[in-house]
Image: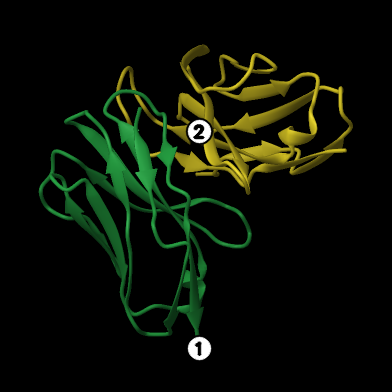
Chain colours: A green, B yellow
């Protein structure tokens, strides 16, 4: 069974600065997918970024980028130029290559301060 | 395209009752997954339906069941409700074809409170 661990329960960052969220996972599979989802106070889960394990290139989406280290089973998220709207819970999630079963980490609460 | 919709958004039930939650996926999406979110257990996978068939199942008791209709809409049923079933139930859809994984897009959730 896969496990996903987010070691930082809460982080705060000043507006316009950069914050990095950690995520480690455990799996015996070679091909899989990793995701970061954002859940603001409205509770709607929003996809931030997706990474395919077979791709060595780190995914980026505007101000969001990941550092994917497959051998270390690490998948961190960097938020650059933080904005007040980035305040939310961030979840790291793992999905196998076949089948839509997401395994989530415990989440990291990010607070962006003005 | 319209996003994933879930009804009702809020629900209050008493112990022993049963409840049915509904989810309409994004148009064209054939896979629907359900998740339970609680403060204690976090986000946990319940089950996934694809083309009206349950394709994956999480570790929940048989009181939790679901189904999917030919138009891909899905329902989730919880029978004999317990206090611990109080949670946010999230539905997610994806355009997955057979035996592959695609990005899941989530609905706003149904907040179930069991008294």
Please tell me which residue is depicted at 39% across the width and 54% down the height of the picture: A6
Residue B20 visible in the shown view:
yes
The residue tagged 1 is A114
Q: Position of residue A106 (x, y in %)?
A: 47, 50
- CA gap between label 2 and label 1 equals 39 Å
The residue tagged 2 is B27
Please tell me which residue is depicted at 42% across the width and 85% down the height of the picture: A14
Q: Are marks 2 and 1 on the same chain?
A: no
Q: Position of residue A57 (x, y in %)?
A: 12, 52
Please tell me which residue is depicted at 50% across the width and 23% down the height of the picture: B58
Reply above or below: A111 against A66. below
**Mark 2, other Cα within 10 Å: few <14 / some 14–19 / many ≥20:** some
**Would you say A75 lies left or right of B70 here?**
left
**Would you say B56 lies left or right of A51 here?**
right
Please tell me which residue is depicted at 37% across the width and 43% down the height of the picture: A4
Q: Position of residue A114 (x, y in %)?
A: 50, 88
């Amino acid at each position: 069974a896969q496990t996903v661990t987010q070691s930082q329960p809460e982080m705060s960052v000043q507006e316009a600065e950069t914050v990095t969220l950690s995520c480690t996972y455990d799996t015996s599979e070679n091909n899989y997918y990793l995701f970061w989802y954002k859940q603001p106070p409205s509770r709607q889960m929003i996809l931030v970024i997706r990474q395919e394990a077979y791709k060595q290139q780190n995914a980026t989406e505007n101000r969001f980028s990941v550092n994917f280290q497959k051998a270390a089973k690490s998948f961190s998220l960097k938020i650059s130029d933080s904005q007040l709207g980035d305040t939310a819970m961030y979840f790291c999630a793992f999905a196998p290559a076949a089948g839509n079963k997401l395994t989530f980490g415990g989440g990291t609460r990010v607070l962006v301060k003005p | 395209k319209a996003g994933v919709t879930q009804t009702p958004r809020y629900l209050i039930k008493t112990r022993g009752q049963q409840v049915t939650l509904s989810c309409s996926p994004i148009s064209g999406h054939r896979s629907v997954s359900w998740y339970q979110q609680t403060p204690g257990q976090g986000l946990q996978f319940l089950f996934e339906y694809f083309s009206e068939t349950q394709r994956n199942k999480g570790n929940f008791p048989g009181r939790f069941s679901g189904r999917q209709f030919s138009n891909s809409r899905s329902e989730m049923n919880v029978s004999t409700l317990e206090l611990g079933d109080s949670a946010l139930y999230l539905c997610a859809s994806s355009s997955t074809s057979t035996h592959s994984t695609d990005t899941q897009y989530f609905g706003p959730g149904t907040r179930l409170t069991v008294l």
